[in-house]
Image: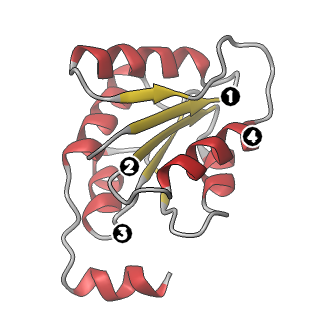
Amino acid sequence: MKKIFISSDHAGFKLKEVIKNFLERKKLNFQDLGPINDNSVDYPDYAHKVARKVKVNKKHIGILVCGSGTGMNIAANKHKNIRAAQCFNIKSTKLSRLHNDANIITLGSRLISKKNALKFVSIFLDTKFDGGRHLKRVKKI
């Protein structure tokens, strides 16, 4: 994994900051693409920033946080070669990487705890794509 790009909207800002601290403690290479506070912003602007960075290199990974995780997910998936996955439990997170080779995780700050968010990020970063029979399906996307 080369670099992690992280962003949020105003609803996800506090959780984004928690995740950034986690990434710093793990000494992972990441870049925060904003916002810099919890003032109201439009989530598509930040989803597009991350998606544009991630699609440049297949080793890049993205983390997007909004209130539900849904808006960021929809916006990011508008980009070619982006496979954003809205993760809400351990199984959905693990399978998003194993079977779908997801390259962006989207999280809902109003739906999951900080503890679970960090667990999901860790699983997302540590799980590798299985390839095999799943590769032909991912190629059809």
Amino acid type at circle 3 is Asn
Q: Secondary structure at mark 1?
A: loop
Q: Which mark is residue 45?
A: 4
Task: Select label 1 or label 2 by which is in front.
Answer: 2
Task: Select label 1 or label 4 by which is in front.
Answer: 4
The first of marks 3 and 4 along the sequence is: 4
Count neighbours of disc 4 (C-alpha within 10 A) and say few if under 14, some if 14 to 19, many if 20 or more. Answer: some
Taking 36 as reference, is 113 above or below it? Answer: below
Q: Quadrant of residue 98?
A: bottom left
Amino acid type at circle 2 is His
In whole angstroms, how far apart are the C-alphas of marks 2 and 3? 15 Å
Q: Quadrant of residue 74?
A: bottom right
In the rendered image, which residue does mark 1 sit on? 9
Q: Secondary structure at mark 3?
A: loop
The first of marks 2 and 3 along the sequence is: 2
Q: In the image shown, does 69 or 56 lie closer to the viewer?
A: 56
In the rendered image, which residue does mark 3 sit on? 100
In the rendered image, which residue does mark 2 sit on? 60
